[in-house]
Amino acid sequence: MPHLEKEYKNLLTREQYVALKEEFNSIFTKEITQMNQYYDCHQQLENNRSALRIRQTGEITLKIPQSDCEVIEITEELPAEQLQWWIEEDIFLLPTSIKLALEEQGIHLSNISPTATLTTHRLEGILSPGCLLVLDESHYSGQTDYEIEMEVEDLEKGKEIFLEILNRHGIEPLQPISKIRRALRAYEKK
């Protein structure tokens, strides 16, 4: 089922990440490591600013940006064994919801191939009602980067809170390119 995710993001230095981690340590209630494998077919998704990923925990997600702060996510949970088999055998049978969403975008994927692998260590916590604070440490192609994300229900209220946090820590607000784009660029440089 499609879900509209509203979020603000900003890249961080390691020092900024550590400072935010210390400040918000008491609200973080979830700590997970996500292993993501991204796929594309002749850069059709990349050219559309979209992304298709498989998480080895058992989900496949299509991300279609709607604006700088809004992304439609379509996620289907599948048995982890099935996803692992797809990865090992390089055989994909996209779930109908994802296939239809791609076709609506004019994208017809035939030979899907892996494009990037990304591992993210994530901390999550509720900052206030309707406001989820996330700190990510991501690893790809021998690189590490840090990012703050804030998933919100109300974009205006969320922006105010997000900018206040950045301002308090002297962090310049910059809309980062997506994790998958950063991972692809790093892979291409290797």
Image: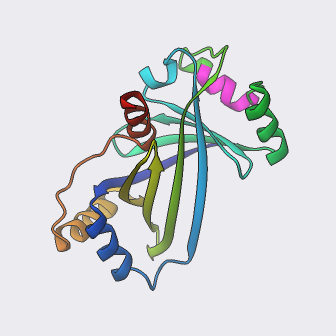
State whether residue 167 is above or below residue 182.
Answer: below
Relative vertical location of residue 83 with respect to residue 170 in this rendering, above or below = above
Q: Quadrant of residue 47?
A: top left
Foreground pick, 175 / 21 = 21
Confirm whether the magenta stretch covers residue 96.
yes
Residue drawn at the location 57% of the way across and 72% of the way down: 30
- In the displayed structure, does residue 142 sit left or right of residue 91? left
Question: Which residue is at the front of the view, 29 or 155?
Answer: 29
On the image, the x and y values in percent for residue 123 come to 49, 69
Q: Quick check: 62 left or right of 10? A: right
Residue 81, x across and y down, in percent: 84, 44
Which quarter shows the C terminus?
top left
**Is there any visible trace of residue 113 in the rendered image?**
yes
Quadrant assignment, res 106: top right
Question: From what the image shows, is residue 186 above or below residue 14?
Answer: above
Q: Position of residue 167 (x, y in %)?
A: 17, 68
Residue at x 42%, y 28% (from the top left corner):
49
Residue at 74% over, 25% down: 90
Q: Position of residue 32 (x, y in %)?
A: 59, 65
Our reading of the magenta stretch's main secondary structure is helix
Q: Which one is in front, 114 or 189?
A: 189
Q: Is residue 79 visible?
A: no
- Toward which corner of the image does residue 186 lie, by quadrant? top left
Is 106 on the left or on the right of 57, as rendered?
A: left
Tell me if residue 84 is in the magenta stretch: no
Q: Please state the extent of the stretch shown in magenta in the rendering.
A: 95-102
